[in-house]
Image (cartoon, rainbow, N blue to C red):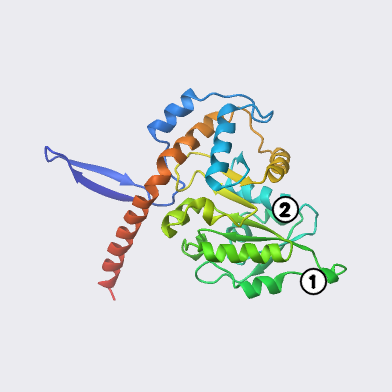
Amino acid sequence: MGEVTTHTDNAKMVKRVIDMRSDTVTKPTEAMRIAMSNAEVDDDVLGYDPTALHLESEMATIMGKEAGLFVPSGTMGNLISVLVHCDVRGSEVILGDMSHIHILENGGISTIGGVHPRTVKNNKDGTMDLGLIEAAIRDPNGELFYPQTRLICIENSHANSGGRCVSVEYTDQVGELARKHGLKFHIDGARIFNAATALGVPVDRLVQAADSVSVCLSKGLGAPVGTMIVGSKSFISKAKILRKTLGGGMRQIGILCAAALVAVQDNVKKLEEDHKNAKLLADGLNQIFACFD
C-alpha cells in the first residue's frame, strides 16, 4: 500500500491510502452501488434477468462477437471455454508454459475436463513462436497414440510476462494457424481492455481472430465480481450448460451485472490515465533504484 499526501485550499494536509497490491482490490464506486441497488432482476438460470441480458448483449457487441455469458470468475470463464472447444475427454490444448490457465487455475482443464495441456515456451513478450505452436499440433494419423489437438490458447495481456501486450498482428497469425489446422482459438483476455488501450487498437479488432474470449470485469475495469465470455451463439449455448454444471448458475445476478455495466461504460475510457499513472510511478521508482546502483 502507498500513502499520498495532498493539500487542500486551506492548506490542510489530506492523506489517502492507495492500495497497489493488485487491480483486483478495487472498491465499487458510488455509481456502481446505486446501479446495484436499483437493478432490475429476475432468474438468470432461467434466462430472464434483464440486466444480465443487457450486459451480455452489450459486451458481445463491444467485443465483436455474437453472444456473451456472465460467469462468476475468470478461472471459470477459461475453464468453460476450454471445455466447450475440447468436448471430447482426452482432447489436447496448446498453451504457453507460463500462461495463467496452465499455472494459476488449479489444473482445472485436466482435473475437471480431462483435457491434456501441451505447453509451448512463452517468450519474454508473452508470445509463443508460431513454428513451435505448429510443431506441437498432433498428427491426426497418430490418433492411436496421441491426444487430438483441438484448441490453441493465448493470453493478452500476459500476466507472467510482466503484463506484456500481444499485438493484433501476432493474434491474427495465431488465428490463421488455428484455422489452417481446423482448430479453435481462445484468448484469455482477463485484461484485454488494458491491452487494447496500450496498443491503440479497438478491442473488437484485437480479438477478431478468436473463436472465444474471456474478459474479467473485476480487474482493471473495477467491477466487484464477474467475467464475461463471448463467442458464437452456439458456443455460448454450450457454455451456459457448463456454467450450470460447474455451479456457476446464479439467480438474480442483475445486481452484479449492474455494477459491471457501470464499469464498462465509465472505466474503459479511464484506462489510458491508469497507464500514464503506472508509467509515472515506474519511472519514479527506477530513478530511486538507480541511486543505489
Q: Residue at x 39, y 45 (%)?
A: 269
Residue 108 placement (x, y as % from top left): 68, 53
Q: Residue at x 46, y 41 (%)?
A: 264
Q: Disc 1 marks which residue?
A: 139
Establish if 217 lies above or below 278: above
Establish if 217 lies above or below 286: above
Categorize mark 1 by other alpha carbons within 10 Å: few (<14), some (14-19), many (20+): few
Q: Exactly how many numbered labels are in the figure? A: 2
59 or 89, nearer to the observer: 59
Q: Residue at x 41, y 39 (%)?
A: 266
Q: Are marks 1 and 2 in contact (CB under 8 Å)?
A: no
* Mark positioned earlier in the residue sequence (1 or 2): 2
- Image quarter of the C terminus: bottom left
Tell me if I can see residue 191 in this picture. Answer: no
Q: Disc 2 marks which residue?
A: 85
Assign a secondary structure to mark 2: helix
